[in-house]
């Protein structure tokens, strides 16, 4: 095999690896369900949410959450996944707000 052919094959392999690595995060989800109870005691179930971005919980927010996914989540009192009063909820566990505190308004996935 010539040197040029080996270099071309190696360069193609590197390019393919970089392309796959760059796209591997696209469409990734937290496998499982996140169930939360709103301020009006409605139950909402989200199946396999994206691991990217901030997920809003609607106008009523959430007062109780069950994280039945394979990854941890963080609950926030704001709609933009920021704030000092965030709560870490490990995979396959749950949590609820302390009475008298504002509801959670968003969550993000730890990945």
Image: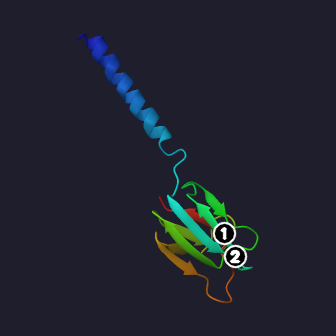
Q: Quadrant of residue 66?
A: bottom right
Indicate how the structure is coloured in the image.
rainbow
Task: Tell which residue pokes out farthest to the left in this image.
Answer: 1
Coordinates of residue 105 in the picture (x, y in percent): 68, 71
Which residue matches tag 1? 44
Number of other residues with Cα within 10 Å of mark 2, as a class: few under 14, some 14 to 19, many 20 or more: many
Q: Is residue 76 above or below residue 24?
A: below
Quarter of the image that includes the N terminus: top left
Q: Farthest residue toward the bottom?
A: 99
C-alpha gap between disc 2 and disc 1: 8 Å
Q: Is residue 79 left or right of residue 20?
A: right
> Residue lying furthest top in this view?
2
Disc 2 to disc 1: CB gap under 8 Å: yes
| Nearer the observer, 6 or 43 | 43
Label 2 sits on residue: 38
Q: Secondary structure at mark 2?
A: loop
Q: Residues within 10 Å of mark 1 (few under 14, many from 20)?
A: some
Q: Which mark is residue 17?
A: none
Q: Nearer the viewer, residue 97 or 68?
A: 68
Residue name at image x 69 percent, y 66 percent: 79
Identify the residue shown where x is 49% and y is 58%: 31
């Amino acid at each position: 095999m010539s040197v040029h052919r080996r270099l071309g094959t190696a360069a193609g392999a590197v390019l393919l690896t970089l392309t796959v690595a760059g796209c591997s995060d696209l469409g990734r989800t937290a496998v499982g369900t996140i169930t939360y109870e709103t301020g009006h005691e409605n139950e909402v179930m989200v199946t396999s949410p994206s691991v990217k971005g901030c997920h809003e919980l609607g106008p009523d927010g959430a007062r109780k959450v069950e994280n039945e996914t394979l990854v941890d989540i963080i609950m926030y009192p704001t709609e933009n996944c920021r704030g000092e009063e965030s709560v870490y909820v490990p995979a396959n566990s749950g949590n609820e707000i302390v009475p008298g505190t504002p509801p959670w308004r968003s969550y993000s996935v730890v990945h």
